[in-house]
Amino acid sequence: MRTTTVLLDAGGVILDESEAERVWADAMVRLLGPVVHAYDHERYAADAAEAVAAFSPSVRQYVLWKHTRPDRTRFDELWSAHVEDMRTRHPSLKLMAGVEEEIRSLTDDFGLVIAGQYGRELLDLLEQHELLGCFASHLTQDDFDLTKPDPRYLERIVRAVGIEPAGCIMVGDRIDNDVVPAKQLGMKTIRIRTGLHRHQEARTPDELPDSDLDSVRGLAATVRAVSARR
């Protein structure tokens, strides 16, 4: 089937999450400092890498549970405190360097759809940069009651805009959350190696993306190359 549509993950593809990742790391060190002796950024980085390798949907929940299990009550208390802390500390959204040019180039040949775990604030940012009109759909995470890595999330997105999964390429920064569910639906996939998940590796050959990029720059050309493959 001819490729007509490109699904773009938000974090790590459209959005640069490097500052957010620093804020999240600081918050987790503050949270676990009173719980784990001598807990610091180095230990958090090691825990986060372990979570990524384990294909955990939530790195921070994995790390917190590692140090509070089997006490579910303690986990819930600390996680609630973390969520409340992040309400006042979350940095403003920022576009990935180079993504504007790639988005505009892609619109020459493909419909674009958002497939990431951000809501209205992402649409506002795209509108500020005059990019919202490049997208065939303005659906966000706010419009769905489930999310990745459940493949039904991606399926509902493409069904909502009247296209077949086999005619899509999913572009994301994670093997577990982006590549695996997309491949389960028959989509082609491109992985951008950015952020916390840049070193995540497929556990089996079936989980390999159709193409890997170290940066969002060059995405449009890679999408065209992947779409041309049979």
Image (tube, rainbow, N blue to C red):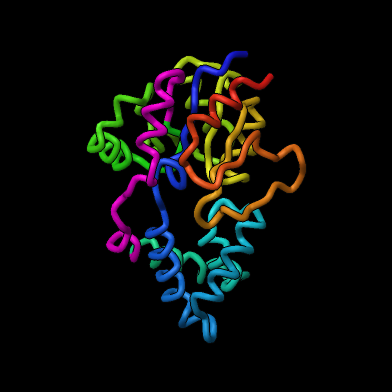
Establish if 108 lies above or below 86.
Answer: above
Classify residue 66 as left or right of residue 147. right
Q: Report if residue 94 lies within the magenta region.
A: yes
Residue at image coords 53%, 35% = 171
User: Taking 92 as reference, is 181 above or below it?
Assistant: above
Looking at the image, which is closer to me, 208 or 176?
Answer: 208
Report the side of 57 relative to 184 (left or right): left
Question: Residue shown at 58%/14% (left/top)?
Answer: 2
The magenta segment is 85-113
Residue 169 percent location from the top left of the image: 56, 27
Query: In the rendered image, which quarter contains the N terminus?
Result: top right
Residue at the spot 53% in from the left edge and 55% down from the top edge:
58
Residue 98 part of the magenta segment: yes
Q: Is residue 81 above or below residue 190?
A: below
- Camera-side residue: 138 or 190? 190
Query: In the rendering, at what x and y percent does residue 161 appear?
Result: 44, 18
| Location of residue 48 in the rendering, given as x and y in whole percent from the top left corner | 56, 64
Q: Please state, as top left, top right, bottom left or bottom right, where the C terminus lies in the image.
A: top right
